[in-house]
Amino acid sequence: MVQDNVCYDITIIGGGPAGLYAAFYSGMRDLKTKVIEHEKELGGKVNVYKEKTIWDVGGLPPTSGSQLISQLIKQALTFHPTIALGEQVVDIRRTDNGYFQMKTDQNRSHYSKAIILATGYGILQQTKLNIEGAEKFETSNLHYAVTDLEHFRQKHVVISGGGNSAVDWANELEPMAKSVTVVHRRHQFGGHEKFVTKMRHSSVDILTPYAIDDVKASPDGCCIEQVTLKHCESGYCQWRKADAVLIHHGYQPDLSFLDHHPLGLQVEERRLYTSHQMETAASGIFAAGDISNHPSSIPLIAGAFTEASLAVNAAKLYIHPDADRYARVSSHNNRFKQHN
Ligand SMILES: Cc1cc2nc3c(=O)[nH]c(=O)nc-3n(C[C@H](O)[C@H](O)[C@H](O)COP(=O)(O)OP(=O)(O)OC[C@H]3O[C@@H](n4cnc5c(N)ncnc54)[C@H](O)[C@@H]3O)c2cc1C
């Protein structure tokens, strides 16, 4: 097993908004910090909606997901934390000297005095289109996320799904696409009422209760050119021309490393019990962001920031019991002198 024997003060598992802000705040508290992220890129779930506009982060004008990610990363790197990308933590245990050892799927071990779990609901696996061989079109026109709106301009777009994402993208793509068809297994949509109404009153062609039953490849076999849509009750089939197919069937979160409740962590409905100070049931392990479950938690980016600073402050006190309870405000903090 490859070892990284350096023992960090804080290791943050997860590089989404909570983990990135924790990395910044941890540097502000003069703690040697590492972030371990399963994906090859930072940003967490915001990567799923990079092109969407985020309105509800205090002090920020409406900002795209990708802009928010790049600003979060820039801020997180202020105090030069170590970043380990492409590694999934699969096991946590306490060492004989009371520190923590984290093992990853890359056969590496990481060591830390304290841990902040910022894993969100876990590693998100997109629920794939359940049609044999469909995966070969993922490099052409079968999409699970919108990374560039221009891919859809003047195209016949078929969207499958009935949640917020499917409805939002139907509304967003409708003015620029040649046509938008939404296919959903149920008559009811799970998206916000206001946006469902907007979609229903637009030119979007809505087919319910329908599901994509088959895809027909172009003559050269490299992309989808047609989808077969099957009525979920009668079995009646019809087809639509498709230049782009967008699937939003939700996510299956993988939080399996917590399944056996390592070190006594209390997992409730795939979230972790935490105190108001973001302490988990295992001393030395803290949590922040969507993973944390306490009476005041809100699964929003703004909530993740507050929880990240609380978790870092609690971790600082765990490592240095005589430390101040929280950091000196940034405007008067010596740590920033060199940056000003
Ligand atoms: C479609 C959509 C739209 C949204 N819009 C808004 C909005 O407008 N405003 C708002 O405030 N919030 C919004 N949210 C919610 C917001 O994205 C989340 O609250 C926020 O991302 C939570 O941040 P987090 O860091 O706790 O978790 P995440 O963003 O989920 O990040 C967790 C990270 O941990 C990593 N990870 C998990 N397990 C491991 C492991 N074992 N080892 C290593 N890495 C691991 C994951 O890969 C992931 O990168 C939206 C969410 C969705 C799905």
Image: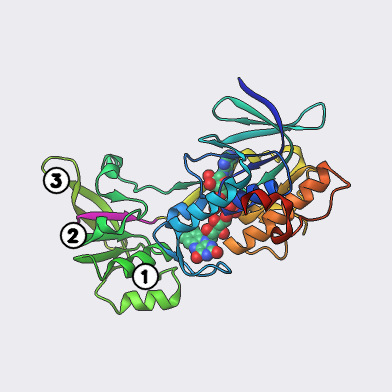
> Which of the two discs, 1 and 3, labels the residue nearer the N terminus?
1
Residue of label 2:
240
Q: Are discs 1 and 3 less than 8 Å apart at CB? A: no
Asked if ligand 1 lies within 8 A of label 3, the reply is no
Does label 2 or label 1 sit earlier along the sequence? 1
Q: Quadrant of the rendered structure where residue 257 is?
A: top right
- Foreground disc of the pair 1, 3: 3
For mark 1, give the secondary structure.
loop
**Which residue is the site of mark 3?**
218
Which disc is residue 187 wearing? 1
Q: Residue at x 36, y 62 (%)?
A: 185
**Direction from residue 39 to residue 226 in the image, left or right:** left
Magenta span: 239-248
Magenta stretch mostly in which secondary structure? strand
The image shows residue 312 at horizontal and vertical percentages of 73, 50
Q: Amino acid at mark 3?
A: Ser
